Structures are given as C-alpha cells and as structure tokens.
Image (cartoon, helix red, strand yellow):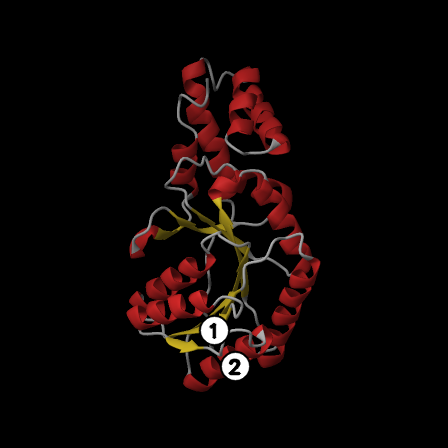
Amino acid sequence: WDDLEEALIGADCGMDASMALVEELREEAQHGRIVNRGEIATGLAKAVTREMSAEPPKISIGAGPTVILVVGVNGSGKTTTVGKLAYRLSELGQQVVIGAADTFRAAAIDQLAIWADRSGAQLVRQGPGADPGAVAFDAVASGTARGADVVLIDTAGRLQTQHNLMEELRKVHSVVGKANPDAPHETLLVLDATTGQNGLSQARLFGQTVPLTGVIVTKLDGSAKGGIAVAIHRELGIPVKLVGVGEKLEDLQPFDAAAYAEAIFSPADAG
C-alpha cells in the first residue's frame, strides 16, 4: 500500500487524492474484492473511473451563441486548443466565431487566423495591444448578430501569481457578461499535463478569479502521467471536459474517464 501511494503521488495525483484512493482500495481488499497485487491496477482504474465520470463532462450548445472563455498560463497550449476546438465544432456543423482576445502576442492572433481559415470560423480581432475586453465584447456581439452557435474567446496566457493580469481576466469575464447576460456559458482552464502539482495551484487561483466550469488537459501524449486531473477533480470539484493527446486536428477529444484511468494507471504503476 505504501508503494501504491508513492506511485500515485509520482503520477501527480496529489497527497490528498492519493491517500483517499489507497484507503478506498484497502477497503476493497478487506471485503475480498481485491485479493492480490495484480488486481490493484484494475481496482484503481475502476475507482478513478467511478469518481471522474459521476457527471459525464459535456459542453452544451444552446439557443443563441454559447460563449466559451478559454483561460490558462503561458505555454499551456491554449491558443492551439482554441483552434482545434473551433475545427471540431465546425466539423460537427456548428457556426463558430473566434475572439482573439490575446492581444499581447501578435503571433497568437496570426495563429488563430490560420485556425479560423481552416475551420471556416469568423475571426474577430484587433491590433496587438488592444483592450482584450473590447475584443471579447465584439466577438460576442458579432456572434449574436450572425446567429453563430458558438463564440470561442482566447485570452492571454498569464501566471496565476500575476495579480494585475488576473484582475484583467476578471474584467474580460465581466465584459462578456455585459454583451450577453448569461455569458460566458463555459470558462475552461487549459492545463499542461507536464506541469504536475503546479496545475492544482493554477486551477485553484484561476478559479478564485473567474468561475471555472471545466478543465482541458493538454500534452497527455508525452511522458506526463496526467494524474493532476484526479487531484483537481477531487479537491476542487472541477470536471475534465477535453484532453489533448497529440498535434493533429483530431487529437483534441472528449474526456473519457475509463480510457484516462487505464492510460495513467498501468500494472507497473501499482507496484
């Protein structure tokens, strides 16, 4: 059991989540449902699946434009994720408007222009250094006027410890609400799976700034275990809605709790 707890912590599940999972499996063993070490990994995957799929993660597209605000730290894959999500939604027949509210990086605006062209989405943009709130407002207004199904708003990457930039994010969230009283309908935090336990700090502090409705975990195709999603779900109650597992367009996928648990908890991890 000590080996299992150590393996879980090493997989970035966090201390609290790791101890809780071990305790759950101990009880399973006491009731005879786990009888040898070889069954621990299977039991672990089932336990994680039960916990993380209690409410199937989904993004509901309603009447009028569904406004999705995408936030995260620098380098998490946020802008690429916005582009892939626009492409995926367009492939499903949704009319998409993208708001390029990351006005700090000209490269981000150019990158979104390429994604918009690929997906047939309309891009709402201003020049570098423009007010992000104004871009977000214009994107929602444009999406409403055009009868779009979804408005995706990319925001500038910022460290969760940068108070002034976090306050700016709060302002963008508020401005979106002025353009549509029900918006944003989703505020999704993009997390790089390789950040480990720092991801929990990111989720906690971003969630204190704007109400998070879900997490997108990127770069799960690398060496990262991605157990941080377990910690965030258990400690903060924020569901994982999408995962990035590669560089291709189709590699942004809906979160599947069973596949995720099986991928991050192999028999080797169970000791």
Residue 99: numbered disc: 1
Q: What is the total number of numbered labels drawn onto the structure image? A: 2
Question: Judging from the image, what secondary structure is the residue with disc 2 in?
Answer: helix
Q: Is residue 52 above or below residue 155?
A: above
Q: Is residue 206 above or below residue 123?
A: above
Amino acid at pointer 1: Gly
Question: Judging from the image, what secondary structure is the residue with disc 1 in?
Answer: strand
Please rate how many residues cluster around mark 2, counting C-alpha atoms within 10 Å: few if below 14, some from 14 to 19, many from 20.
many
The reply to whether residue 122 is in sight is: yes
Residue under the point 52% across and 20% down: 4
Q: CA distance from mark 1 to mark 2?
A: 8 Å
Q: Which residue is mark 2?
A: 138
- Image x and y of residue 1, in percent: 55, 16
- Name the foreground residue: 172 vs 88: 172
Residue 196: numbered disc: none
- Image x and y of residue 32, in percent: 50, 16
Residue under the point 63% across and 55% down: 206
Which quarter of the figure has residue 91?
bottom left
Counting residues from the N terminus, which is met first, the one under dot 1 or under dot 2? 1
- Name the foreground residue: 157 vs 129: 129
Q: Are marks 1 and 2 in contact (CB under 8 Å)?
A: yes
Amino acid at pointer 2: Asp
